[in-house]
Image (cartoon, rainbow, N blue to C red):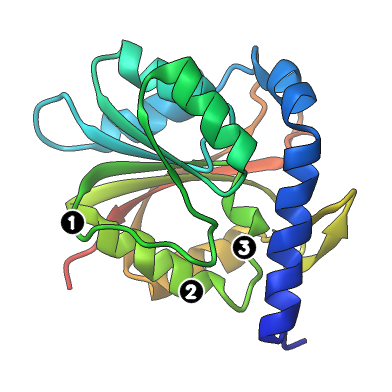
Amino acid sequence: MHLTPEDLANITTLTLAHYEDNADSFEAGTRDHDVSQNIAALLRHIEGEPPYDILDLGCGPGRDLKTFTALGHRAVGLDGTARFVEMAREASGCEVWHQDFLHLALPDDRFDGIFANAVLFHVPGQELPRVLRELRAALKPRGVLFSSNPRGGNQEGWNRGRYGAYHDLEGWRSLLADAGFEELEHYFRPQGLPLEQRPWLASVWRKASA
């Protein structure tokens, strides 16, 4: 199915409106989520001496920006939801950019790591290759991308007011390889449960040499 520019604009508008309308309840509901495993997975693969320059892509209300800052890193947030941008700036004191995922304007070779926790599944499949290349360009040489997405059978569509694309491991690997990344590791979350009860695919990737 090919999505027209009008389709893509509608997807962005409605998905962001969902988060805008539910910003306070989303912040309350995710405030205590433990994503320390994911943060550690990103940081342990970044080369060189800290502090690192980190982009928190889809930073939401700023929970993880606070964590990166507390760890001594230089974190920048990005979100398409205006209310989240305000909340993240206030909560973290970090610079937070108001951009949506289909209209990124990122500086080249800026970041040691990009933390894309529960965000890239909102990018429609036909646009994802371009978005991944833009993220790659924003990383410094041998920079690291972390992603975590709800896994599925490579289908996409609307789910409770938000658009999502749900990839399996092999499909995700193919997309990242084609965009110029090398896999470092992957795992399924949450820990300690049978595989069928771990719906999140987390993976870590290095920017490959051109």
Query: Mark 1 Cα within 10 Å, few/some/many (few <14, many 20+)?
Result: some
Q: Residue at x 50, y 26 (%)?
A: 88
Across and down, in percent, residue 84 comes to 60, 34
Residue 123 visible to an observer of this rendering: yes
> Which residue is nearer to you in this view: 3 or 48?
3
Secondary structure of residue under mark 2 = helix
Residue matched to label 3: 123
| Distance from the alpha carbon under mark 1 to that under mark 2 | 18 Å
Residue matched to label 2: 129
Quadrant holding the N terminus: bottom right
Residue 55 position (above or below residue 177): above
Which tag, 2 or 3, sits closer to the chain's start? 3
Q: Is residue 209 left or right of residue 181?
A: left
Across and down, in percent, residue 133 comes to 37, 69
Q: Amino acid at mark 3?
A: Val
Q: Amino acid at mark 2?
A: Pro
Q: Is residue 44 left or right of residue 200?
A: left
Quadrant holding the C terminus: bottom left
Q: Is residue 180 left or right of residue 19?
A: left
| Distance from the alpha carbon under mark 2 to that under mark 3 | 10 Å
Residue matched to label 1: 109
- Which labelled disc corresponds to residue 44? none
Across and down, in percent, residue 172 comes to 56, 62
Q: Residue at x 69, y 62 (%)?
A: 12
> Which residue is nearer to you in this view: 43 or 107?
107
Q: Residue at x 16, y 24 (%)?
A: 51
> Which residue is nearer to you in this view: 38 or 192?
38
Across and down, in percent, residue 30 comes to 69, 21
Q: Amino acid at mark 1?
A: Asp
The quadrant where residue 14 appears: bottom right
